[in-house]
Each structure stands twice: as structure tokens, then as C-alpha cells.
Amino acid sequence: MQEIGSYTVLLFLQSSCRGHGGRLAEVTTKAQSDYLISMVKLLKNGHDYWLGGRDDIIEGTWQWASTDRVFTYTAWGPGNPSNTGGNEDCLHLHDFPPEGIKWNDNACQVGMKFICEKPKSIYLGLADKFYIYQRLSLVLLIEQSHHVAGNHREDVHRPRPSGRTIR
């Protein structure tokens, strides 16, 4: 397995999301965070998912990868962000018992599922696709990433719609 750099991993994940008409998920409110976590729990296949946050440009300044906007809302787990080993530049969801699922920083090269968001209108005609609703009628797509150069397998999970829009 060949490791690839943080920037390359972010480009790969963003490209994968763009291929579905979206971007890596950006969680900007507590309501969005709570709803996303509740949907991840329903999947019952682990709680580690990449989101669209990074601090690889300026260490300690967390921003959204698609817009470079600095975080205005955070939901860090205990002791985080920690930058353990000096290379934890990407944001993901992680279970911190007993606190529950919170944000964690990790080395971007770690293979795990990732969450994309996209405007619902793109998929209006495809009723069997990607049903986790979020703010502004965004739909979340959850995929599996394998950070091995030249190897990407797509596993798409389709949670049932809740019919809720979170603001």
C-alpha cells in the first residue's frame, strides 16, 4: 500500500464527491451535527466517517475543504483536535464513549468511509439514491474510501428518508 499526502487525499475525496454532484460534508450548526450523527448511528456499520474539514494549510486553523471557510461551529471530542504525531490534518466523526460521536482529527491517509453532501435537486428523478436530508435540502452520500493509490471501491449506503430538513 502506498500512502499519499494529505492534499492528495483531500483532492481524491472531493473529486469523488464531485463525481456525484456534491462535496465533502460541511457541518456548520449543532442541528446539522445532531442530525448527521443520528443518521450515522442508523447505519450500524461503524462511526468513523471523513467530513470536509482540514487544517493542513495553517496548523490549528480548521477550514472547510471546498470553500476554505474557517469553522464557525465545532463539535470536537475530548482532547481534540490533538494533532497527534504532527500530521492529523483531516476531520472525521469518531465515537468517544461515553460522550458519543464527536469530531476528531486524524491523519488524512487513514482509509475510512466519507460523507458527501449535494443539492437534493440534482437527484429529484432518482428516487432510490442517497436519502439523508440536511440543511437547505442537501442530501448526504456516504462512501467507503481506500487510500491506496489507484484503488477505490465505492460502497454506497442508502438510509431511509426521514422527511426532515435541518436548518
Image (cartoon, helix red, strand yellow):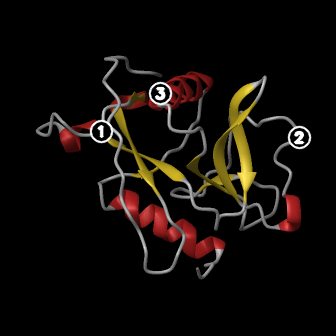
Question: How crowded is the residue under tag 3: few (<14 C-alpha within 10 Å), some, or many (20+)?
Answer: some
- Of 124 and 102, the residue lying toward us: 102
Circles 2 and 3: CB atoms closer than 8 Å: no
Callout 3 amino acid:
Met
In the picture, residue 110 is in which quadrant? Answer: bottom right
Reply above or below: 56 against 165: below
Q: Which residue is drawn at 57% across and 50% down?
A: 50
Callout 2 amino acid:
Gly
Q: Residue at x 31, y 32 (%)?
A: 131
Tell me which label, 3 or 1, sits earlier in the chain. Answer: 3
Callout 1 amino acid:
Phe
On the image, numbered disc 3 is attached to which residue? 39
Badge number at residue 79: 2
Circles 3 and 1: CB atoms closer than 8 Å: no
Reply above or below: 25 against 75: below
Q: Which residue is drawn at 59% across and 35% down?
A: 28
Q: From this viewpoint, is residue 74 visible?
A: no
On the image, numbered disc 1 is attached to which residue? 130
Q: Distance between the residues labelled 1 and 2?
A: 33 Å
Badge number at residue 88: none
- Of 167 and 129, the residue lying toward us: 129
